[in-house]
Amino acid sequence: MLTTASLSHANTRTARTKAVPACHIKKCLVYSGNLMKAGASGIRNSALRKSQEELISSLDDALQAFLQKQGSCFYVPENDYLEIPDTRHKDQFDQEDLEDLDVSVKLFYLPDSTSTSHFPASYVTESLENIKRHLGVNHIQDFVLAFPGYKFQEDSEEDINDVIPAWNEIEHFHAEGAIKQLGVSEFSIEKLDRLSKRVQVVPQINHIDVLPCFDIPVDMAAYAKANSIKLLTHQDSSNILPAEIFNALLTKHGLVSSVEQAELIPRWVLKYTSVIRSRGIIASKGYIVSASRY
């Protein structure tokens, strides 16, 4: 089991060194690193959707590197907070590229992320601050919210109230210029319509999973065109990071002594892609995972 680590971080944080007893980690943040610089290896399962497989493999690699090097984490003992960046494949851009960078992110609220009646707006703030700091950018081009259990082929009346706090939060950052375009994932026409009537900024993007039909439904395409909504397809798992798999990884790499003692529940996953606009190339791609006991 991991017991100590030499701690360092960016100048905006205070470097500290202290034993890190795994049982005292109450919250952790893990970065996958830039997957464009290294192919993720590890867990492979044809039954998993592409993004879930990619995320699990990249976390496996990042934790393995941390275990071997033990020199690139940030720990706050007062809060039992552990942050693990993957410095092997850190996203680094010169100033010219930063000014020409379009960053798109998708924030996944995970099934066990909340015991309240809504999806916490604080996850938007937390994930946005971390991706801006990680990439060194001032704004995000596209910010898409994905909620567990949503399928665009299905509809339910009660869901919209749950998502309003999170949507209001990205509206706030949109007004400040920190987010350019706002989006949702797997929203039916009915959900899009009800949400649009409750908010100031209507969705500009809708991610939809076209499997198993492989075609965008005609009524959805017509609605999107009439309301200037960009339809983007995806192959993301509805539960991109199950808690038992995340805790199995923590156990494998010695951050906890056993799955039973892990108790760290993944709260959100941020998937990001940055593109150098003038050259049309993907500069970086990766994930950030936040998990906690509370």
Image (cartoon, rainbow, N blue to C red):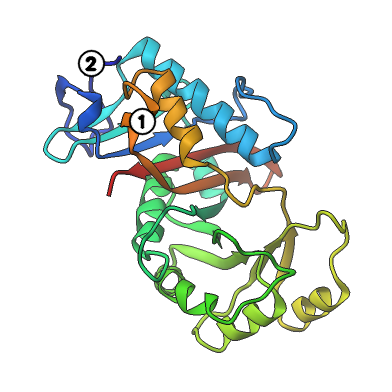
- Count residues near mark 1 (Cα–Cα under 10 Å), then give few for <14, some for 14-19, many for 20+: few
Q: Which mark is residue 186?
A: none
Q: Which residue is drawn at 39% across and 10% down?
A: 68
* Callout 2 secondary element: loop
Q: Which of 86 and 191 is in front in this view?
A: 191
Q: Eyeballing the image, is 122 above or below 69?
A: below
Q: Which of 233 and 229 is in front in this view?
A: 233
Can you tell which quarter of the image residue 194 is in?
bottom right
The picture places residue 265, in percent across and down from the top left corner, at: 38, 43
- Count residues near mark 2 (Cα–Cα under 10 Å), then give few for <14, some for 14-19, many for 20+: few
Q: Name the residue type under label 1.
A: Glu
Q: In which quarter of the image is the N terminus?
A: top left
Q: Name the residue type under label 2.
A: Thr
The picture places residue 169, in percent across and down from the top left corner, at: 40, 70
- In this figure, which residue is indicated by the disc labeled 1? 260
The picture places residue 211, in percent across and down from the top left corner, at: 81, 54
N-terminal of the two: label 2 or label 1?
A: 2
Residue with the most extreme left position: 78
Can residue 93 be seen by looking at this rendering?
Answer: no
Tell me if 154 is positioned left or right of 2 in this view. Answer: right
Q: Residue at x 57, y 35 (%)?
A: 55
Can residue 141 be seen by looking at this rendering?
Answer: yes
The picture places residue 101, in percent across and down from the top left corner, at: 56, 47
Residue with the most extreme front position: 260
- In this figure, which residue is indicated by the disc labeled 2? 3
Can you tell which quarter of the image residue 258 is in?
top left
* Callout 1 secondary element: helix
Tell me if 26 is positioned left or right of 138 in this view. Answer: left
Q: Eyeballing the image, is 147 above or below 228?
A: above
